[in-house]
Amino acid sequence: MKKLLNTLFVTTQGAYLSKEGECAVIKIDKVEKVRLPLHMLDGIICFGQITCSPFLMGHCAANGVTVTFLTEYGKFLCQVQGPTKGNILLRRAQYRQADNYLQSAMLARSFVIGKIGNSRVTLARALRDHPDKIDCEKMHYAQQLLAGCIKKLGNETDQERIRGIEGEAARIYFEVFDQCITSSDPLFCFNGRNRRPPVDRVNCLLSFLYTLVTHDIRSALESCGLDPAAGFLHKDRPGRPSLALDMLEEFRSYIADRMALSLINRGQIHANDFTVSATGAVLMKDDARKTLLTAYQKRKQDEIEHPFIREKMAVGLIWHMQAMLLARYIRGDIDMYPPFVWR
């Protein structure tokens, strides 16, 4: 099993990264601030005006350390990575299944089942933890509707029908998501998903976290030899990591939504940690982004028992395990792909 390594997040604007010996060195105004052994990293994520030396990027590409550049506010820009890993036979099998309507639908269905199952658990946790602060009747009803969506999926093999059920489940879930927010600050009011750009604080947090998890899933798929661009639920589009977005569906609620709720409900993130631009876009301030990144790294260190293989592992390795299970399914080593559903 892969060892969980660290991800280096660089958020200080104007920082310069270079390679010295076997270390990544971060300098600000030509003054060395941090020096980290490269063998301890599996990724470097740069936010905003960060520059990297060609030698560092070359070394990272050759040694499997993905270097990703995002805007200061988390929008994906580009990624530097080395030669494609894995064997061509696995990728050919993946492409054949992606082109096969029935097989593609079966995998799409698994991802959606994982998404809806974890959404139900998130609502159940809110009911358990805050029964005195939420509309329990409304939440129970939403849970029932989500259970109905899973039942509808059944043996569904129509891809458009599966996408329709996924959309219906997302609508049901986000209609009651505001009930999970126990902060009394009205600026954390949630009225449904919006993005590109997010126009409220909750959506700003969610979009940023989805970007982080997608990055990690993409790296996990690559490390298992799968092509993150060839998806089953999400259609092919140039530049889009469709398979990573497929697998993200299993982790949106379990990782990102719960973390956003935790940061808000525990008062780790405040309404004044955001700015609102003239266009209405809501942006996170630098300190809030650092708080979120620290919490995300800490969450990845938590240990859980994987519900399918029954082995304990760090949360940050779950998507690696799911990628391995997906590769085994595509190779024909197992009969079905088990979506990650936390109970």
Image (cartoon, grey):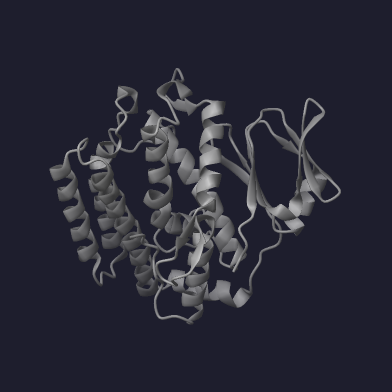
Residue 119 coordinates in the image, percent (x, y): 31, 52
Answer yes or no: is residue 171 visible: no
31 or 235, nearer to the observer? 31
Image quadrant in which you'd find residue 337: bottom left
- Above or below, 50 against 309 in this view is above
Image quadrant in which you'd find residue 104: bottom left
Residue 208 coordinates in the image, percent (x, y): 48, 39
- Check the picture and name the quadrant holding the N terminus: bottom right
Q: Looking at the image, which residue sits at the far right?
A: 21
Residue 124 coordinates in the image, percent (x, y): 26, 51
Residue at position x 63%, y 48% in the image? 7
- Above or below, 175 against 43 in this view is above
- Above or below, 22 against 175 in this view is below
Residue at position x 30%, y 23% in the image? 186
Image quadrant in which you'd find residue 201: top left
- Above or below, 272 against 38 in this view is above
Answer yes or no: is residue 174 visible: yes
Residue 255 coordinates in the image, percent (x, y): 43, 49
156 relative position to 318: left or right? left
Residue at position x 29%, y 70% in the image? 157
